[in-house]
């Protein structure tokens, strides 16, 4: 049985007082009685000891009494609860020296007959556990720039969606076909009709897709959402109960279908049906025209499954060129040092006012993670392509009706350093009607090189990227002037054939 905190304080005080008057006390057990002139105590093992209150006469008595006092102190401290020791060591003993011998006797009586009042024990413990009051916390935002970033994120985050893609796989033990998750990416809400814009390469290999949208909390999810819903989002920001990074929003997951894709620009449009308009928050569109290097930029996406991640940086370059998933060049691409990682694809790139100026599409990195060089398709290109995909379900672009040889191969194999070589001309196309020629083999087995396109409407063509860029500036049905170098075989004075290029 363990002594209570107040019992130990009172007893230790009594011992200190007895030491001053030459009186010793034995080990105090829970059951004790006090006698006038002497004290008799009984411990838990039934041991009885007696000490008479007499004056010390010799030095031997002094040593004996002092040893008894030290032994009693050690026993009391060994029995004391951990929460009581600080109080005993800090103030209880120090104040004990003021007690008298009579105080010792009167103190022992209530300890033996009744437990200490609860409020006294609580007071002692409370005094021991007090901690200093912490200093006032700093303001949430250090400056207006932080407040602006926070406001932009909280306004735009509900417009950014989490996309999971699935492929079909047949069960090896049956004929059942299962949906297997193959990847994830980002996207953003385009309009109130449920159109979602993302990259083509996000859904390129998918048979189906689903979209997780942040919706205003109203106590229940939409009846058209998937329940239960699979999502590859990592735990944390999106909890199992649908909680999100924004306390006033929850997560709703919907099946999505593909409306149209444009592989040459790496753009795809999805659509979620039966979504209440109140749950859709279309992104605010800006313009990519007139952007300047050094402007602030913000990217929101789902890198590595970490939903609604905000990164910041600047526009570090404009007018860049990257290749689409099918190898066609995408021109006028925006370069940014805002961190873009796998999973950010399809997410918006914002300006300092929170307007969408581009769509994250690619990074340049030797490791596969962000190296500070990310690229985004300009918003003006996204507007044009998305509008056409929603209207027609496909992209209608002007074509010359020719197939061409890669400029690198033409340079290495044929020594053509300028222009684009025509390999074949499609019958019935405008190029065939204009008389353009492709590569062909003669009856004698000689391979005749086709026309080499060197300019479109006076704009020089150095490689195939220049040709694509020049053609895209026109509409189907427009008439354009094409300048080509046509190889012609002429015989020299020795009768040897020579190839000469003739511009037509």
Image (cartoon, grey):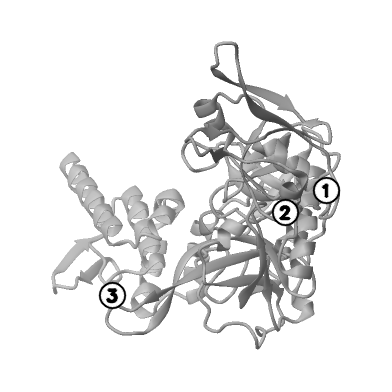
Residue at mark 2: 429
Dot 3 alpha-carbon crowd within 10 angstroms: few under 14, some 14 to 19, many 20 or more: some
Residue 244, placed above or below residue 200: below
The residue drawn where x is 66% and y is 26% is 418
Image coords of residue 339 (percent x, y): 61, 43
Q: Earlier in the sequence, mark 2 or mark 3?
A: 3
Residue 369 visible, this angle: yes
Tag nearer the camera, 2 or 3: 2
Question: CB atoms at circles 1 and 3 under 8 Å apart?
Answer: no
Q: Is 347 placed above or below 439 here? A: below
Q: In the displayed structure, does residue 409 sit left or right of residue 82? A: right
The residue carrying mark 1 is: 474
Identify residue for label 3.
33
The CA distance from mark 1 to mark 3 is 111 Å
Find the distance from the CA under tag 2 to the CA under tag 3.
120 Å
Residue 385 percent location from the top left of the image: 75, 58
Q: Report x, y in % for residue 47.
A: 13, 70
Question: In the picture shown, does residue 230 fall above or below 433?
Answer: below
Do we see residue 332 in this rendering? no
Mark 2 neighbour density, 10 Å: few (under 14) some (14–19) many (20 or more):
few
N-terminal label among 1 and 2: 2
Tell me the residue at 35%/57% (across/down): 12
Q: Quadrant of residue 246?
A: bottom right
Return the residue nearer the eye: 248 or 123.
248
């Amino acid at each position: 049985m363990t002594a209570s905190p107040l019992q130990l304080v009172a007893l230790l005080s009594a011992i200190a007082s007895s030491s001053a008057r030459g009186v010793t006390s034995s080990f105090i057990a829970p059951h004790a009685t006090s006698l006038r002139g002497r004290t008799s105590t009984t411990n838990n093992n039934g041991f009885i000891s007696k000490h008479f209150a007499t004056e010390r006469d010799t030095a031997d008595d002094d040593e004996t009494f002092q040893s008894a006092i030290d032994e009693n102190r050690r026993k009391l401290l060994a029995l004391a609860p951990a929460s009581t020791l600080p109080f005993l060591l800090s103030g209880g003993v120090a104040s004990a020296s003021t007690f008298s011998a009579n105080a010792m006797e009167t103190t022992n009586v209530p300890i033996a007959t009744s437990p200490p009042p609860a409020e006294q024990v609580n007071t002692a413990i409370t005094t021991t556990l007090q901690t200093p009051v912490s200093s006032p916390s700093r303001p949430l935002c250090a400056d207006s720039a932080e407040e602006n970033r926070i406001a932009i994120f909280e306004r735009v985050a509900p417009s950014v969606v989490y996309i999971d893609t699935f492929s079909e796989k047949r069960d090896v033990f049956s004929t059942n076909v299962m949906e297997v998750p193959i990847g994830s990416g980002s996207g953003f809400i385009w309009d109130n009709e449920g159109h979602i814009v993302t990259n083509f390469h996000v859904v390129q290999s998918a048979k189906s897709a689903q979209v997780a949208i942040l919706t205003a909390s109203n106590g229940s999810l939409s009846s058209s959402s998937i329940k239960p819903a699979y999502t590859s989002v990592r735990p944390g920001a999106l909890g199992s109960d649908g909680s999100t990074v924004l306390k006033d929003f929850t997560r709703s997951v919907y099946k999505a279908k593909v409306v149209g894709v444009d592989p040459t620009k790496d753009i795809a449009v999805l659509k979620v049906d039966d979504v209440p308009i109140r749950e859709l928050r279309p992104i605010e569109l800006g313009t990519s025209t007139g952007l300047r290097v050094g402007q602030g930029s913000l990217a929101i996406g789902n890198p590595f499954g970490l939903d609604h991640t905000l990164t910041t940086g600047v526009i570090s370059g404009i007018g860049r060129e990257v290749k689409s998933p099918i190898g066609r060049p995408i021109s006028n691409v925006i370069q940014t040092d805002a961190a873009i990682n796998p999973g950010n694809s399809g997410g918006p790139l914002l300006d300092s006012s929170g307007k969408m100026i581009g769509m994250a599409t690619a990074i340049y990195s030797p490791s596969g993670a962000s190296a500070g060089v990310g690229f985004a398709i300009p918003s003006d290109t996204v507007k044009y392509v998305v509008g056409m995909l929603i209207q027609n379900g496909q992209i209608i672009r002007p074509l010359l009706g020719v197939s061409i040889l890669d400029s690198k191969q033409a340079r290495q194999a044929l020594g053509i350093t300028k222009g684009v070589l025509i390999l074949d001309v499609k019958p019935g196309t405008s190029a065939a009607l204009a008389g353009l020629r492709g590569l062909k083999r003669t009856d004698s087995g000689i391979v005749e090189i086709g026309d080499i396109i060197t300019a479109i409407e006076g704009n020089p063509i150095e490689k195939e990227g220049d040709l694509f860029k020049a053609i895209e500036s026109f509409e189907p049905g427009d008439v354009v002037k094409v300048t080509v170098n046509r190889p012609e075989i002429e015989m020299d004075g020795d009768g040897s054939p020579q190839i000469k290029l003739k511009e037509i």
